[in-house]
Amino acid sequence: MTPKIKYLVCNLKANKLKEEMIEYERELKNIKVKEDTKLIVCPSFIYLYMFQNENYDLGSQDVSEYTEGAHTGEITASQLQSMGVKYALVGHSERRETFKEEEKTIINKIKKSYHSHVKPIYFIGENELEKNNNQTKKVLKQQLKNIIDEVPDYKREKLIIVYEPIWAIGSGETPDNSLIRNRIQCIKDFNKGVYELNLPVLYGGSVNGDNVDELLKIDNLDGFVIGGSSHNIEELKEIYNKI
Ligand code: PGA
């Protein structure tokens, strides 16, 4: 059975110069959109103004943990909202690892997003060592608990979860379908069993035009986050057309 893919999130990361981004957006707004699938594009902050078309939804790759004020270099959730941003990526492993973002910061970012009606897309996933030590399920549950416990009940159902095994990001290596299915089910069962929540769970990590057909056989998936493959508009179109 092919799953009902509700979200395709494009994480453009720190890529493209201005002219390239203008060209990218021109192509993006001409993609023939499907009614039930949300195409969410997350460019660098400086390019958000270019992405103002109803063909897709706009997301940011990060959000400040602070509100407006004397925070040089920060971009707040309310500023993002004023630019038409509907979603914010929070807790991406590159932020956790390179920028040493800790749970407390991630919680603050999620709270600030909610406050400005920007929906958080929250990333969880195990690293190579945790995988090898059979810690994956424990790590995933803890990462979910850390956030959900901090969010008021009525806002919890707006969370979108992304399962990204850190060892698979940008590696060209995707886990096999049974592993992904199993992890996604573990996340869904935990959310349902402990919090009575039916949250969408997306998969990310080296999804591309070649492996998406195979990944689409995973019946409990709600969508994908694509990094490297979304940078090339033709490959993005290929993936979008397949889902
Ligand atoms: P990737 O990135 O598709 O290049 O592995 C995914 C991500 O980092 O969100």
Image (cartoon, helix red, strand yellow):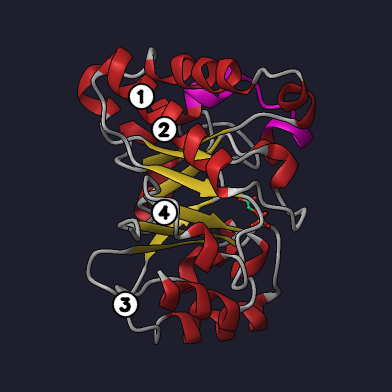
> Does label 4 or label 2 sit earlier along the sequence?
2
Residue 223 got which mark? 4
Give the label on residue 189, or none.
1
| Image quarter hosting the N terminus | bottom left
**Along the viewing direction, whichever of 186 and 90 lies nearer the viewer:** 186
Query: Circles 1 and 2: CB distance less than 8 Å?
Result: yes
In which quadrant of the rendered image does the C terminus lie? bottom left
Amino acid identity at mark 1: Asp
In the figure, is residue 60 to the left or right of 12?
left
Q: What whole-number distance in Å separates the C-alpha atoms at marks 1 and 4?
A: 17 Å
Q: Earlier in the sequence, mark 1 or mark 4?
A: 1
Magenta stretch bounds: 96-108
Q: Is residue 185 magenta?
A: no
Q: Main secondary structure of the magenta part?
A: helix
Q: Going from the N terminus, do you reach mark 3 or mark 1 first?
A: 3
Q: Secondary structure at mark 2?
A: helix
- C-alpha distance separating marks 4 and 2: 14 Å
What residue sits 47% from the left and 68% below the top? 49
The residue to which callout 2 is attached is: 185
